[in-house]
Amino acid sequence: MAINKIRINNFTIFERIEIEFCDGINVFVGENGTGKTHLLKILYAFCRCDTSPSIETTNRSKPFDSYLAECFQANYVLNLIRRVNSISIYPLDIFVNNTSGNVEYVISSDSESSSSISEKKQIISAVYISAKDMLTHSGLEKDFIDRNLPFDITLIDILNKAGVSTIKNLSKDQLAVLNKIARVIDGKVLYKNDRYFIEKSDGTIIDFAAEAEGFKKLGLLYRLIETGYLEKDSVLIWDEPEANLNPKLIPYLVDIILTLEQAGVQMFFATHDYFFAKFLEVRKKRDSKVVYHALYKKGNEVSCESQSDFALLENNSILRQSIDLYKEEVMKVME
């Protein structure tokens, strides 16, 4: 069920971009404003949509463009068309391909008529983790529709997926990841009465609101694994996994991610962190599938460069800044 390729024309900041993915770990790097989060949300909308014949009668299924608008908190996809000097540029064309089918969404003029051309594609089990902590706000998902809360669908989905019952028969790989997380946060995650807690190894129970931000992030991952959303053939999409994590915890996070990759989970990350990107490169196994995608601006157009090694990226803003800092430090010492 891996996602193989994406092609985007005239959507948000993208004039034209095409990227091929590996079925393991894909890491997006690039300066602010190069579209890393936009790519993650498009991929998530693709995973959620269902193009099977029963879509009209299925409450949990919507077409690609509906999910796309909800991921960007937009009323219509038309609001997301790339604009130059306040003029909308057409055609808008988004094509995503995976091993079970394609979805291509096209708007060919400035009218509201649009077409979705697709092969049969079922919903892909996917999780989107944003840089924001949401489990502390558990319960908002119940008021999302009735109260018209100002959140995009990715933030509400994570609450819905974390707030279901724990599955009983976890695989050996899933249990291995849970044990790794439990050792880092010194406990396990509890879900009671719509609230989240961490029960420490000494029996102390800590409310999520009072827990360290880094432990909450790992606790969310723990919860998504024990509810069955991260298993073989599923997709994990994570924006800034390093956010709120002490650098000391990055190696543990990387080991957890590599274990999930070996278990058959395809992953997409957007990061600004040198340690996260570099630890993935250093700790990956010979059979690990890891590809880095550097997004960069060439004039007004966003382009992408992909490499299997972090250090081989020519347009590597993270590595470039690290080198600049080192040079500045050397100059200061020499003075």
Image (cartoon, rainbow, N blue to C red):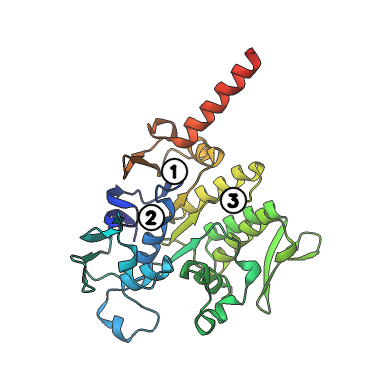
For the residue marked with disc 2, what is the amino acid?
A: Leu
Tell me, for residue 29, which label it has, or none. 1
- Taking the image as drawn, is residue 96 in sight? no
Q: Earlier in the sequence, mark 3 or mark 2?
A: 2
Measured as percent of width and height from the top left, residue 200 is found at 76, 61
Query: What kind of element bears circle 1?
Result: strand
Q: Name the residue that disc number 3 marks.
A: 243
Measured as percent of width and height from the top left, residue 33 is found at 43, 48
Compared with residue 48, is residue 251 higher up or lower down, i.e. above or below? Answer: above
Q: Name the residue that disc number 2 marks.
A: 39
| Distance from Cα at disc 1 to Cα at disc 3 | 14 Å
For the residue marked with disc 3, what is the amino acid?
A: Ala
Compared with residue 51, is residue 298 higher up or lower down, i.e. above or below? Answer: above
Query: What kind of element bears circle 2?
Result: helix
Q: Earlier in the sequence, mark 2 or mark 1?
A: 1
Q: Earlier in the sequence, mark 1 or mark 3?
A: 1
